[in-house]
Image: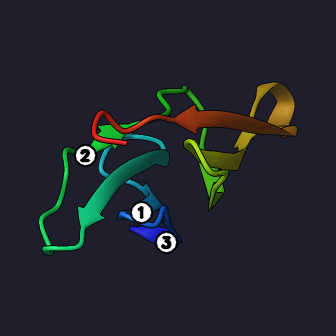
Amino acid sequence: STFPQVAWSGADLGLTWRDDRGVDGEIYFTTLDSGGVLGPEYQLTENASTDAHPYLIWDGGSFRLVWSGYVAAGNSEVFTASVLCSDE
């Protein structure tokens, strides 16, 4: 795992990282509550190319994630997503 990022929501810590457990690097997300309990782990990307450099913030209502992904011909693009937690 590489490129770890954390953000505090006021209730939970959001964690994101890049992981190479498959063929290509993908972006993952989970939460850690104030009692130290990890939430479910989610794979947020599933591409034929490598995703990397996640950056995570809390925007007051959801975690916001930005990352770069390599697309056709080796060009890199920037992607974004909201990550809503069921207990938020």
Q: Earlier in the sequence, mark 2 or mark 3?
A: 3
Judging by the rendered image, the residue that carries numbered circle 1 is 15
Circles 2 and 3 in contact, beta carbons < 8 Å: no
Q: Residues within 10 Å of mark 2 (few under 14, many from 20)?
A: few
Q: In this view of the protein, which residue sits in the foreground, 88 or 31?
A: 88
Judging by the rendered image, the residue that carries numbered circle 2 is 41
Q: Amino acid at mark 1?
A: Leu
Disc number lying in front (1 or 3)? 1
> Does residue 84 appear to the left or right of 56 in the view shown?
left
User: In what element is the residue under mark 2?
Assistant: loop
| x, y percent for residue 68 | 74, 47
Q: Quadrant of residue 85?
A: top left
> Does residue 79 appear to the left or right of 20 in the view shown?
right
Q: In this view of the protein, which residue sits in the foreground, 70 or 15?
A: 15
Circles 1 and 3 in contact, beta carbons < 8 Å: yes
| x, y percent for residue 65 | 63, 47
Q: Amino acid at mark 3?
A: Pro
Tag of residue 4: 3
